[in-house]
Image (cartoon, rainbow, N blue to C red):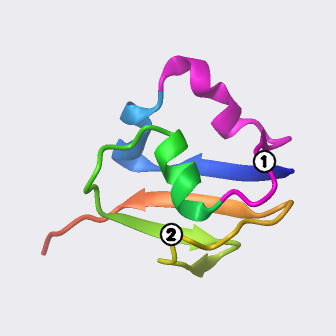
């Protein structure tokens, strides 16, 4: 199945240059039954990194959530400031 994955801000530094698949408009091929957490691990983000995760435009923290064909996953780093 195909999903779309986009990384924003400082997260892009963790993606190897060979992972251009992540930004292609046609999507990224993953196995049926792939979870949100598995995709996060596939893009080699550091363990413990705090993320804002949007799945199809809605906040989703469920790392066990099984993705469906056509899903769009957007990952943002959590930032503090004020």
Measuring 70% from the left and 72% from the top, which residue is drawn there?
56
Measuring 81% from the left and 66% from the top, which residue is drawn there?
68
Residue 44, how many percent across, how many down?
43, 37
Q: Earlier in the sequence, mark 2 or mark 1?
A: 1
The answer to whether residue 43 is above or below residue 56 is above
Residue tagged by mark 1?
A: 31
Q: Confirm whether the magenta stretch covers residue 36.
A: no
Residue tagged by mark 2?
A: 63
Residue 22, how many percent across, how many down?
65, 38
Describe residue 31's horizontal placement relative to residue 66 as left or right.
right
Occupied quadrant, residue 51:
bottom left
Measuring 52% from the left and 60% from the top, which residue is drawn there?
37
**Alpha-carbon distance for marks 2 and 1?**
16 Å
Give the crowd class for mark 2: few <14, some 14-19, many >=20 residues within 10 Å.
few
Give the crowd class for mark 1: few <14, some 14-19, many >=20 residues within 10 Å.
few
The magenta-colored residue range is 16-34
Occupied quadrant, residue 29:
top right
**Element marked by disc 2:** loop
Describe residue 44's horizontal placement relative to residue 31 as left or right.
left
**Element marked by disc 1:** loop
Describe residue 13's horizontal placement relative to residue 15 as left or right.
left
Q: Confirm whether the magenta stretch covers residue 18.
A: yes
């Amino acid at each position: 199945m195909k999903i779309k994955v986009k990384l924003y801000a400082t997260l892009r530094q963790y993606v190897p240059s060979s992972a251009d698949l992540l930004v292609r408009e046609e999507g990224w091929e993953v196995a049926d039954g792939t979870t949100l957490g598995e995709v996060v691990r596939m893009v080699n983000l550091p363990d413990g990194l705090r993320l804002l995760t949007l799945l199809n435009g809605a906040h989703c923290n469920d790392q066990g959530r099984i993705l469906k064909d056509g899903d769009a996953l957007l990952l943002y780093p959590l930032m503090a400031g004020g």
